[in-house]
Image (cartoon, rainbow, N blue to C red):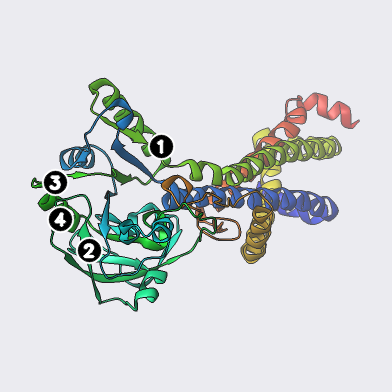
Amino acid sequence: MDCKKRSVLYLLRKRNRSVILWLILFVITTLMLACITIGHGAEAAMERLFQAMGGYFKIEADHKQGSNKYVNDELVNHIMDSYEIQEFNGMDTVYFMAGDMELAPGRFTQEGDEKAKLARLMGNTDTSLNEYFILQSLLLAKGRHITAEDSYKALLSQELAEKNGLSAGDTISLSYYGGDAGLDWHTFEIAGIFQIKSRQNSYTSNTAECDMVENFIFTDTRSIREMVGRALEREIDSYRSGALFFVDHPQTLERIVSDLAAQSEQGKEGWQVVKNNKQYQESRIPLERLKSLTTLIVAIVIVLGFLIVTLILLLWMRERVHETGIYLSMGISKISILMQHMMENLILAFLAFVLSCILAAGAMPRLEQAVLAVMDDESWSQTNESGSLTEQDIAQPESESGIEVTMELSFLTILQIGLLEFCVVILATGISSISILKMKPKSILSTMS
């Protein structure tokens, strides 16, 4: 009789023991499966979080060092060609007179100053990559975003559009503030209307119109350069507010930022690198804590499970001395006996593994809800309470927990669980069996007598 048949017959004959060991293995497998799945979900959530709010750095002029240089096209092209950059957004901030358009009132309106017509015009190679839109402080409500191919396009706030009866497709006239007197007015077509998601209610009587987010106007880089260049009578090839560069992985970000910072310091280039992932680092704390906790639980389950299974098998193995002696007297080798013991426990482990995977697949939605409930209890969201909306105080994406944690029972997770469980069973079986198999047949027979 081969070891497979002996294994099945033993399991059927020792039903109670088989059920006990199966239940233990089932609990171990289920706990590991749940924890590893949660850990993978947290890791994937951190990746999505990084791409949503932390996957970029900023290059800007270092005015603290007395530099009057701006980030130019040559520097941008060098960075794009030298590093694994996914996308970039060059930015400019200039001020334009709004002409007949009525702005949300501020300090200069009360003072009767002509600067009450001054609006902040924010140039972008791609407005969808501006921090206000990336972090969802502003949301596109109508129309479309402005891209590098556009010229003389504009995005207005809903408040500004409603105050002036404007909609997507209409035109507005703006004049560059700071150039020569009598500068021509330029016509912009409204490409879209944005909604202010995180409204600031703490404006004071000293807040200027151009500092109010309601009066922000986003436009394209091409028109900014053309108008400012005409006013200053020179060609513009730089971004006054710097440029954002987007990467796809935290390690890539750290490496590129370190390299560029070293170049800037050594060459005294007049620009600096700003790693804009503070919110990402703060927001990922609950996810890191969750991942660390699940890793710790998995380690504890593996160690305790191994010790429990080994102890039980050692106790049961003492009662199998008579059985082992009979097998040896029949000419069955010790290797064959060990394989039988392995087969018995691996059969139970496989059955526990299959049932655990089936139940886990059905329980994933509830597990996901439970994890989200835990995440909601964390200090996740941060409220912006500054007087004006700045690049440093942009709010995080609005959701209950700040990031969606999705639980998926992937093939990789199943493979990891199967390998861990079978390793525990094989190791525990080997340790419990060695106490008898190392005995000589004469010693076993003398013990039997």
Which is more N-terminal, label 4 or label 1?
A: 4
Quarter of the picture holding the C terminus: top right
**Residue 22 vs residue 237: left or right?**
right
Q: Are marks 3 and 1 in contact (CB under 8 Å)?
A: no
Q: How crowded is mark 1: few (under 14 residues within 10 Å), some or many (20 or more)?
A: few
Q: How crowded is mark 4: few (under 14 residues within 10 Å), some or many (20 or more)?
A: many
Q: Which residue lies furthest to the top in this view?
A: 266
Packing grade of label 2 (10 A; few <14, some 14-19, many >=20) is: many
Task: Give the CA distance from mark 2 to mark 4.
Answer: 10 Å
Which residue is labeled 1 in the image? 251
Q: Which of marks 2 and 1 is nearer the N terminus?
A: 2
Q: Which label's residue is closer to the chain start, 4 or 3?
A: 4
Q: Which residue does the numbered mark 2 point to in the structure image?
A: 174
| 371 or 297: nearer the viewer | 371
Which x, y percent locates residue 35? 65, 49
Q: Which mark is residue 227?
A: 4
